[in-house]
Image (spheres, rainbow, N blue to C red):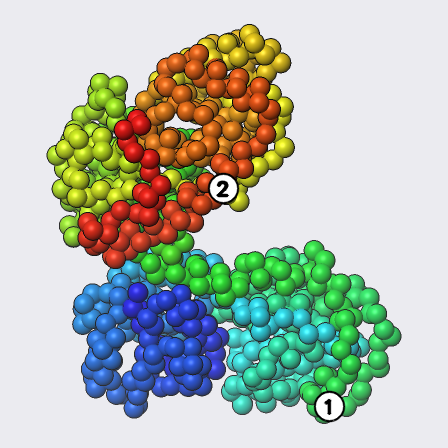
Amino acid sequence: MRLAFIIRDLGHGGAQRQLSILAAGLVREGHEVSVLHFYGGPFESNLREAGVKTICIGKKSRWDLLGFFFRLVKAARSVQPEVLHGYLAESNLMALFLKPFCGFPRVVWGVRDSQTDAHLWGTLGKLSFRLNCLLARFADVIICNSKAGRDYYLARGYPAHKTHVVPNGIDTERFKPSPHEHPLTFGLVGRLSPMKDHATFLKAAALVPNARFVIVGSGDEAYAQQMRDLATSLGVNATWLPAQSDMPSVYATFDCLVNSSAFGEGFSNVIGEAMACGVPCIASDVGDSAWIIGNPAQIFPAGDHEALAKCMLEFAKQSSPLAPREELSASTTDKFTEFDNVSPARPRFAHLAERDGYSTRSRIVAEFSIERLIERTSRLLGKKVMWITTGLGSGGAEMMLAQLVNGLTKLQHVVVSLTAGGKHAASLPNVHSLDMPAGKPTLSALWKLFLLVRREKPDVLMGWMYHGCFVASIAKFMRLKQVPMIWNIRQSLYDLKLEKRGSAMVIRALAWLSWLPKRITYNSQLSSQQHEAIGYAKVKTQLIANGFDVTKWQPRTPTRGLIGRFGRNAPMKDYPTFIEAAKIIHAKRPETRFIIVGAETDQLNVPPYITVLGERHDLPGLTASLNIAVSSSAFGEGFPNVVGEAMACAVPVVATDIGDTRWVMGETGRLVPPRDPQALATACLEILENGLTQDLAARERIERHFSLTSVLSQFESLITEEGTQRTQATEVTPLTSHISPLTSH
């Protein structure tokens, strides 16, 4: 996408640094990124080196308003942004005001604090804050860098459904442990400002003997002198240093970082950076410091110097130096570089950073790395996709939907289920239920859908299964704006008489409405031909097979002589045929065991040698434990997931020749006619008699042709503008080259 950031300046600061990191990362992801700034600054060169276009508007003075705005409009129009992303309060307002001049792009606000200090800004600052609170509802997305910031601004009128948390990202390649041997040192890093509350740090330091204290930062000189005078009066020997460019070397000289901020802290970069360097941290309970550190014992109430001193003394008490502690020099004029003029060694307090009691680098790498920042931001900046599905139960179609929503991380997702609950509801983000009784639309459900569509303003509508496609068509007219719609058909269609009456009516209605969607995806070629035969628009067809996570479905040691049938209890699954085949197999090989797994299967009447486990959530392990996996479906299968899952686990498969099972299996496994217990039993007995071995060729076929990675890529292309505007000549996916002729069906 074309993305333009707007920020006041590019000077030294946490927000500016995060913007620089984020913009560079988005460029690496393939986006076209520009930064419009009012005054320039040192980060401008970093951005240009990363391939980011920078445009300085050149605000001449405080009262350069009209001319400045015209120059800003001209600059914004020149980059033709699809997304305008403000950074900090006044830039957020500018992004909103620019929207009608730039073709109405999506507007994103960036909130970088957890509590405003507008009372220090003067009249214009206070007015800016009030305008932000008043106009926030007109932004499309609001990104806070802290949970505390989100809570603070929600209480002041920011819309909850648009306001999200994306923590800052820490460059874990730059900030990493660099061991040195030095006296016990507590450090404080931050600009010289009342917000950082140096006074609490100094008062606590006066209560901690035999330690060195280092304060790093630049800012208001009057405030700095006031703090130096306070340190002298308290008898605290502190080393004062201006802002440093090589912060990893600075953190390497600390045994513990202290953040004593009194207010305003959102996501503290210095805490994340220090932790990435393996340095334990103690912080005031401001912003998201407690969340980042993850240990309540390292958090103290803001402004409470006695509580801070207690934390520092506890840290010193628990330390166990590997070498005798040096006597601290009485002089406070030691050069900071002297801290580094010692031979490298394991930090004397490294054990504190490695154990659970103090947060470690691994927490930063896992939760707050640059990669996580880019991933989270890309999703919020991407297209918003509204998936409308019949339900979120335990079927294969529902599982595939969950994999797509969780796997397409560069898109925003809203999931609307026509019915309440379901196995996959808890695993999906932003789920809404219309609470419709099965097959019975209600006025209240339609009204709820209307409110959701108007509030979420999706960029793409995805209908999932028949009823989901039908309701997506209704939602398209509710949107009151041209948005692409895609239908996703997830089953084959042998005979409408086999469907419920209501479902059959919906299927016929969709044939009449099939001119509406941009694309109609099918997960099997047979399904596409069957639906085209009853009137579904052929020109809209796109084939995308189901995909399997081969890291989840893996071969394991099977249980000897175990045959399994997995799937919900429904007429199309034809459990009676499997049970009859099991009786034939048991008569010839009584040592063979059978299991049935699936929703509502406990209603089946089975002989004692068949174990019914009902619905289970450990399917990969259960599948891998089988010697033979059976699919006995009589009709309705499009792309049978249970077949692909078993193949991924290298389990031999015996399946009925339904839907695209032949295509999925290729030359592996055994195909038998539907509703033929004798043929099903014979195929299983042949495998048992030939010896129980894993079918590695089946797993290789899944890895090569039906991996989840490939399917996610195809859906991402489909949902993007490129994918929804492709011509018929290029719409068939590469997977069709592996399809067997349909005459075999």
| Residue receiving disc 2 | 700
Q: For mark 2, does the 10 Å Cα neighbourhood hold few (<14), some (14 to 19), or many (20 or more) residues?
A: some
Quarter of the image where the N terminus is located: bottom left
Residue 323's disc is none
Tag 2 secondary structure? helix
Tag 1 secondary structure? loop
The mark closer to the camera, 2 or 1, is: 2
Q: Residue at x 84, y 70 (%)?
A: 322
Q: Residue at x 56, y 84 (%)?
A: 245
Q: Between disc 2 and disc 1, whose residue precedes? A: 1
What amino acid is found at the position of numbered circle 1 in the picture?
Asp
Q: Residue at x 39, y 70 (%)?
A: 27
The image position of residue 125, as x and y in percent, is: 35, 77
The image position of residue 197, as x and y in percent, is: 57, 75
Side of 325 where 377 appears, left or right: left
Q: Is residue 148 visible?
A: no
Residue 648 vertical placement versus 350 (above, below): above
**Picture quadrant where residue 351 is located:** bottom right
Quarter of the image where the C terminus is located: top left
What amino acid is found at the position of numbered circle 2 in the picture?
Glu
Side of 160 where 592 appears, left or right: right
Cα separation between marks 2 and 1: 65 Å
The image position of residue 513, as x and y in percent, is: 14, 37
The image position of residue 61, as x and y in percent, is: 30, 90
